[in-house]
Image (tube, helix red, strand yellow):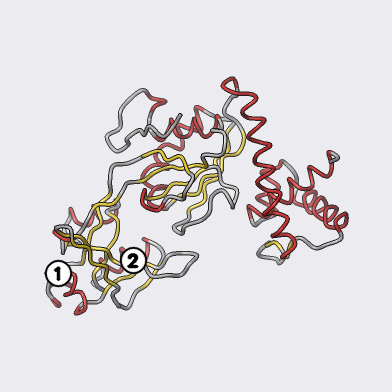
């Protein structure tokens, strides 16, 4: 393969995985117009259209999807081989693509952005907030952050937080009007504020546990969303009962009395937040440095909200 052909394929994979000429061009150090010319050259050489382009989006055609499916793992393997050859002497540099839950972005990543940038100025953090269940390897991410029970297979997992509580909460005003449920079965008499998974579009079931008994409940209500910025205010405004992870917004509202917890003896804890990456890929220096920062290893101190895992080599 000639050098120009390799560059064309690498450019094509960058566009598909970022769904944007502008973001791919920035990643490759090219102008968008130069990148467009590279893709046109590849399509002309292969004699087939690889990308569907509109003013708002870029997506692969069916031939493009098949090419990406075959060539992207090969390119990642080549990058891994080069990184592994350089080994421990490599410095943390390049673009690090992270796919993360919004909760993890707010709680774990955002407070440490400045420190990481100061310590590793040659690393570009490309952070995508995604509350769905994306295939991080298939979509070109270096790592993802998810709740432990939702990790993909064949992954190395690093625990970032202790287990997380699931809480059923409602406003005092709502409970004054409709009463408090004593068991999950009582929820049939209440409005439920529901979470819809991005991507699949499925509604999340509410799983309760007590004394070894598990009950899954699907309720109805007037609000469904895929974002905390909608469902938490809906609960605060008295629109129903919400069942969600105990994030900062809910914890603060419970503390100041704007929300009240119900079904506490039925609400379980779930595995905490984990960073995960493919076990088949070499641990890049930039990713190792990012993990160290999230675990506060770079400070040599212990953060009670973060717990190191034996999953990192």
Residue at point 65%, 32% (across, down)? 81
Task: Bin the neighbour count of mark 2 within 10 Å (Cα to Cα): few under 14, some 14-19, many 20 and up.
Answer: many
| Mark closer to the chain start, 1 or 2 | 1
Residue 82: quadrant of the picture: top right
Task: Bin the neighbour count of mark 1 within 10 Å (Cα to Cα): few under 14, some 14-19, many 20 and up.
Answer: few
All told, the count of numbered labels is 2
Q: Secondary structure at mark 1?
A: loop
Location of residue 181 with respect to 149 vertically, above or below: below
Horizontally, residue 209 falls left or right of residue 65, namely left
| Residue 190 position in % (x across, y down) | 21, 77
In the image shown, does 105 or 59 lie closer to the viewer?
59
Residue at point 63%, 53% (across, down)? 18
Location of residue 33 with respect to 57 vertically, above or below: above
Name the residue beneath numbered marker 1: 183
| Residue 1 position in % (x across, y down) | 84, 41
| Residue 313 position in % (x across, y down) | 46, 29
Name the residue beneath numbered marker 2: 231
Location of residue 192 with respect to 25 vertically, above or below: below
- Mark-to-mark CA distance, 1 and 2: 22 Å
| Label 1 close to label 2 by CB (< 8 Å) | no
């Amino acid at each position: 393969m000639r050098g120009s052909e390799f560059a064309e394929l690498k450019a094509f994979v960058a566009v598909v995985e970022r769904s944007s000429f502008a973001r791919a061009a920035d990643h490759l150090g090219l102008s968008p117009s130069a990148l467009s010319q590279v893709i046109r050259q590849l399509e002309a050489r292969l004699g087939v259209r690889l990308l569907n382009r509109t003013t708002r989006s870029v997506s692969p055609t069916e031939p493009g999807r098949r090419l990406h499916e075959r060539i992207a793992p090969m390119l990642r393997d080549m990058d891994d081989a080069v990184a592994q050859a350089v080994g421990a002497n490599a410095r943390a540099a390049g673009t690090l693509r992270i796919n993360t839950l919004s909760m993890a972005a707010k709680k774990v990543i955002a407070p440490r952005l400045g420190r990481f940038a100061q310590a590793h100025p040659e690393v570009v953090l490309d952070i995508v907030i995604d509350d769905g269940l994306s295939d991080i390897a298939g979509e070109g991410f270096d790592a993802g952050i998810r709740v432990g029970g939702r990790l993909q297979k064949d992954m190395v997992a690093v625990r970032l937080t202790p287990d997380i509580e699931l809480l059923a909460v409602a406003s005092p005003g709502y409970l004054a009007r409709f009463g408090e449920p004593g068991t999950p079965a009582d929820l049939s008499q209440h409005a439920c504020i529901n979470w819809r998974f991005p991507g699949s579009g499925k509604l999340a079931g509410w799983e309760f546990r007590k004394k070894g008994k598990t009950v899954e409940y699907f309720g109805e209500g007037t609000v469904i969303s895929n974002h905390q910025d909608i469902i938490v205010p809906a609960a605060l405004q008295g629109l129903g009962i919400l069942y969600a992870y105990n994030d900062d917004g809910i914890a603060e509202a419970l503390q100041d009395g704007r929300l009240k917890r119900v079904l506490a003896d039925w609400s379980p804890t779930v595995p905490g937040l984990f960073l995960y990456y493919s076990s088949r890929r070499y641990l890049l220096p930039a990713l190792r440095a990012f993990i160290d920062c999230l675990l506060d290893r770079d400070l040599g101190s212990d953060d009670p909200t973060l717990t190191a895992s034996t999953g990192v080599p």
